[in-house]
Amino acid sequence: MRALVTAFDPFGGESINASFEAVQRLPQQAGALNIATAVLSTSYARSLSALEEAIARVKPEIVLCVGQAGERAALCMERVAVNLQDAEIADNDGARPIDQPVVAGGPAAYLATLPVRAAVAALRAQALPTQISMSAGTFVCNHVFYGLMHIAATGPLRYRAGFLHVPPARSMAPEDVARAIVIVLQASADPEAKVEGERQK
């Protein structure tokens, strides 16, 4: 089974991004999973085309996008992506959209199709602080999450998809975050695990 995991480059004047630090530590193989990775720019304009190219290249059964949430102290499995761009700070291109849709005419929201509750249970079983989140915000993380789910809903490939927010590196070691990502992928690979939302056409 093929999995694609994406991270973001640093943004907001920071020199590192916890998602990148963790994803570059992932193994290429975890049990029956082949893990491919890609790094997305923290850019409204450039991130989704890079994501779409990575999906076309890998042809995964699972896609997990990972982003840093500086104000959070726990791993957060996101459930809902909203069709809204509303930036409090500029992205890495200097863009700061206000009240703009991610996809014009798209649904108001998408649910993740990863087994969110099963993943959270598996993470907690390994003593990793984890919670279900109902909001991925309105910055580039949500932009990518919504774009990911829209690509899954309208594109030719079938795969389970979702988003994991991780704390900054000062709050959780990159090795622990990498271990958490593998746990989420393994939970997502279980065909019996209940997904949060059905493929939407």
Image (cartoon, grey):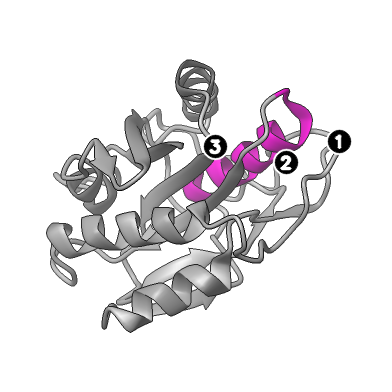
Residue at position x 36%, y 74% in the image = 123
Q: x and y percent of residue 139 in the render?
A: 51, 50
Q: Amino acid at mark 2?
A: Pro
- Kindly report the distance in space between the C-alpha atoms of the residues bearing marks 1 and 2: 8 Å
Residues at marks 1 and 3, CA–CA distance in whole angstroms:
27 Å
Q: In the image, is residue 142 part of the stretch drawn in magenta?
A: yes
Labelled pair 1, 2 in contact (Cβ < 8 Å): yes
**Residue identifier under label 3:** 61
Please state the horizontal and vertical placement of residue 31, each as a whole percent of the image: 30, 48
Q: Is residue 10 visible?
A: no
For marks 3 and 2, the one nearer the N-term is 3
Q: Is residue 196 magenta?
A: no
Q: Secondary structure at mark 3?
A: loop
Residue at left offset 37%, top offset 30%? 41
Residue closest to the eye, 137 or 127 = 127
Point out the frontmost of discs 3 and 2: 3
Judge whether 186 appears above or below 100 on screen: below
Residue 168 in the image: above or below residue 74: above
Dot 3: few (<14), some (14–19), or many (≥20) neighbours within 10 Å? Answer: some
Q: Residue at x 49, y 27 (%)?
A: 51
Are discs 3 and 2 less than 8 Å apart at CB?
no
The label shown at residue 101 is: 2
The stretch in magenta equals 139-156
User: Which residue is label 1 attached to?
Assistant: 105
How far apart marks 3 and 2 lie (CA) works out to 27 Å
Looking at the picture, how far across and down is residue 130, in whole percent? 38, 77
